[in-house]
Amino acid sequence: MKVFIINAGQVFAHSGGKFNDTVADWTMRFLDRKGFEYRISNTNNDFEAMTEVENFKWANIVIYHTPIWWFQVPNRFKKYIDEVFTAGHQNGMYASDGRSRKNPAINYGTGGLMQGKKYMVTTTWNAPDTAFTLPGEFFDQQSVDDGVLFGFHKMNQFVGMDNIDGFHFHDLEKNATQERIENYQQDYLQHLEKVIILEKQLS
């Protein structure tokens, strides 16, 4: 199994990207222990789009680690997506939008070339998980995946990848105690054990 990790923990303003660095490190250590091959890119660094396309094509599983800023991915990560996915057009990521000129009303989003590959996304939030689950709270009981990440999931579906259940880290500014971080680490590693090892067994 080959895993491509994208660390989108951007350094900007008051954010140092440190927690996403930590999560990426947890992931790499887990993959080391399990004997997986992996590559990693950090969106703070300069990149060559075609090289990144090759990383996507090389991997069986892509793992995205991203904070959520203003209910979207950070600007460096968006730049990365725009440039890399565009470079992947007719180069192993997607052939077209899937439609034909004879009947352009149907089959949009079916031109992906990455069938058989999987992706997983983790997100980090200032918002507590209760902002998504309690009646009357900010996100109107809409989950991260069905709400803020809806377009992100469709992006990956567009190129043909299937989703592996992700993991969301909440309340990391006002309530980031050492105990909570340690509990999150344990829960996240258990999550990886469940979903990544299952994918290995199914491959």
Image: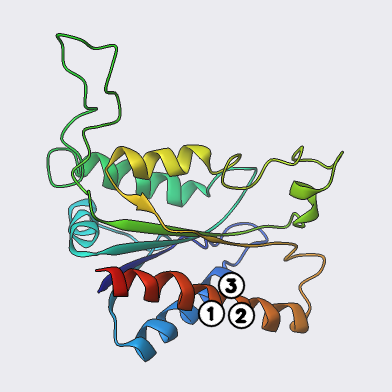
Q: Amino acid at mark 2?
A: Gln
Quadrant for the N terminus, please. Answer: bottom left
* Relative to 115, residue 106 above or below: above
Taking depth in this image into account, of 200 and 183 the one nearest to the observer is 200
Give the CA separation, mark 1 to mark 2.
Answer: 6 Å
Q: Secondary structure at mark 3?
A: helix
Q: Is residue 116 left or right of residue 33?
A: left
Residue for point 53% across, 48% down: 73
Which residue is labeled 1 in the image? 189
Q: Is residue 124 left or right of residue 44?
A: right
For the residue carrying disc 2, how many other residues have a C-alpha within 10 Å: few (<14), some (14-19), or many (20+)? some
Which residue is labeled 3 in the image? 18
Q: Secondary structure at mark 2?
A: helix
Q: Quadrant of residue 2?
A: bottom left
For the residue carrying disc 1, how many other residues have a C-alpha within 10 Å: few (<14), some (14-19), or many (20+)? some
Q: Is residue 75 left or right of residue 181?
A: left
